[in-house]
Each structure stands twice: as structure tokens, then as C-alpha cells.
Image (cartoon, helix red, strand yellow):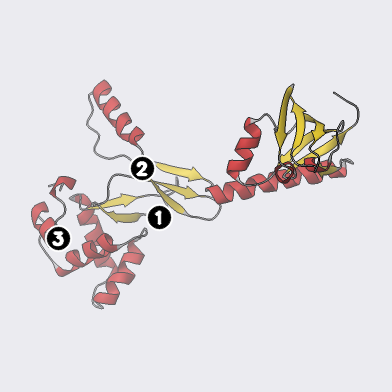
Amino acid sequence: MQVSRESHPLSPKERLMASGLRVTPQRVLILEILDEAEGHLDAEAVYERARERDERISLATVYRTLAKLKEVGLVEQRYFARDHKREYYESALKAEHYHFTCKGCGKVIEVETARIAQARAELSATLGIEITHVCVCFEGYCAECAAKRRRQREDEHMAAEKEKGGTYVPMGTLTPGQRGRVVQVRGNARFRRRIMEMGVVPGEIIEIERLAPLGDPIEFKVKGYHLSLRKADADQILVERVDGAL
């Protein structure tokens, strides 16, 4: 018998009774551990926590119990990678969700999206099938690791260009009439997005038109548009000096 989420919240003992499983101390203990867990536990981690409360429990008992609890829908089995090398377990009390695993640091991020439920409903209606389980693993790089990879690529590009004789300077050091080819936009993701939406992207040519009396802000031209930036922001943009006027 599958226990639906509508029957929650029930105690571990009540859920076992509702599922038709015999209530045993080991089953109650493992359900309690999974209910309390904030992270993601594999069988060995469940075993280690169970041993802290019951020294007599064995790893084999933990594996058998998890399999039985999964069979009746009290426990969800998850995979965080395509190779399915390691199985993780979660309480079925949790709302339906999926996992993103960072290939850089190994961080696991829980993901909730209505798109999966929409796909299930669409496939069921179109094909007349009954979907009982969905297994989706997202892999890639978290925001921090993606930023590191982007900086690494930019640094490698800059190093390669320097070997060719290129010279890079902050855009804020250019004077009126000087031009530069954008090489790198530094700063946080929000700043880079704002700057790139202005058309200041790697490869574009900018020309300094005018400086305010105190040198701030800086007025410049890019793609035929006349724009301005504060000098502190302009200094976050690395350019390669280009001779001649636009």
C-alpha cells in the first residue's frame, strides 16, 4: 500500500501502521532519522546515525528497512548523478523536488519546479500512461563555481592575448578621443549583466567622448549610442587600446 502525502503529518509509527507494515523499533528509528535530516543521507550515513541510538542495529538491517520503506512509499530514493553510483534517501514527507549537483564543489541544491509536474500530466494525457515515479538529475556548476570558471577562462584569454603583445587597461584610464576594445567586464553578476545590457560586451569598441570636470562620470560611445558611467564602474571594464577615432 502506498502512503500518500495527504495522510501527513503522522508520526513514524502511525505511517507504518497506515502502510500495512509491521511496526518495529528499527523502522520507527530510521523514519525518525530521515524526518529529522536536513541534508541528504545514503544508507551508510543512516546507519551511523542509527548506531548512535541503537548499538545493536546492523548495516544489513538498515538496507533491508530502507528497501521496505521505499516499497510502500514512506521513503524516497534519490540519485544525484547520472552514473547512479550512490543512492540517497529522504523522507516522503518532503514536497516533490529534484536535485542539482555541482561538478565543481559537489554541492547539492534542492530544486522545485512546476515544469516536471506539467510534463507528467502532458505525457499521461497524450500517451494514456500512468507515471508513478520520475527520476531527474541536474548537473552543472553552482553560481560560485560558474563565476570561478568564467574568471579562469577570461584570465586564460587575457594571458594568451598578452603573449601576442596585447595591453589591457581599465576603461576609466582612457582620455577623450581614445578608443578601446572591451576585453573583460569584472565585478559581480548583477553589475556585469547591467553593463552588458548597455552593449559593453567583450569585442565591442568604445570611445571616450567627454569627462566631467572632476573626471566622474565618463561619457563614452558604443555601437553608436552615447552613454555614461561612473569612473569606479568604468574601472571594472578592461579594454585593449585601439588607435584612431571611430
| Residue at the image point whose x is 70% and y is 32% from the top | 200
| Residue at the image point whose x is 71% and y is 43% from the top | 154
Tag 2, which secondary structure?
loop
Quarter of the figure that contains the C terminus: top right
Q: Position of residue 80 (x, y in %)?
A: 42, 50
* Left or right, 246 with reference to 47: right
Q: What residue type is labelled 3?
A: Ser
Residue on which the image places disc 3:
11
| Residue at the image point whose x is 87% and y is 30% from the top | 177
* Left or right, 102 with reference to 241: left
Dot 1 crowding, Cα within 10 Å, few <14, some 14–19, many 20+: few
Residue on which the image places disc 2:
112
Q: Earlier in the sequence, mark 3 or mark 2?
A: 3
Looking at this view, is 61 or 144 the one in front? 144
Residue on which the image places disc 1:
86
Dot 3 crowding, Cα within 10 Å, few <14, some 14–19, many 20+: few
Name above or below for residue 237 compared with residue 124: below
- Disc number lying in front (1 or 3): 3
Cα distance between the residues tagged 3 and 2: 25 Å
Q: Earlier in the sequence, mark 2 or mark 1?
A: 1
Q: Judge whether residue 219 can be spotted in this image.
A: yes
Marks counted in the figure total 3
CB contact under 8 Å: marks 3 and 2: no
Tag 1, which secondary structure?
loop
Q: What residue type is labelled 2?
A: Glu
Dot 2 crowding, Cα within 10 Å, few <14, some 14–19, many 20+: few
Q: Which amino acid does label 1 sit on?
A: Arg
Cα distance between the residues tagged 1 and 3: 28 Å
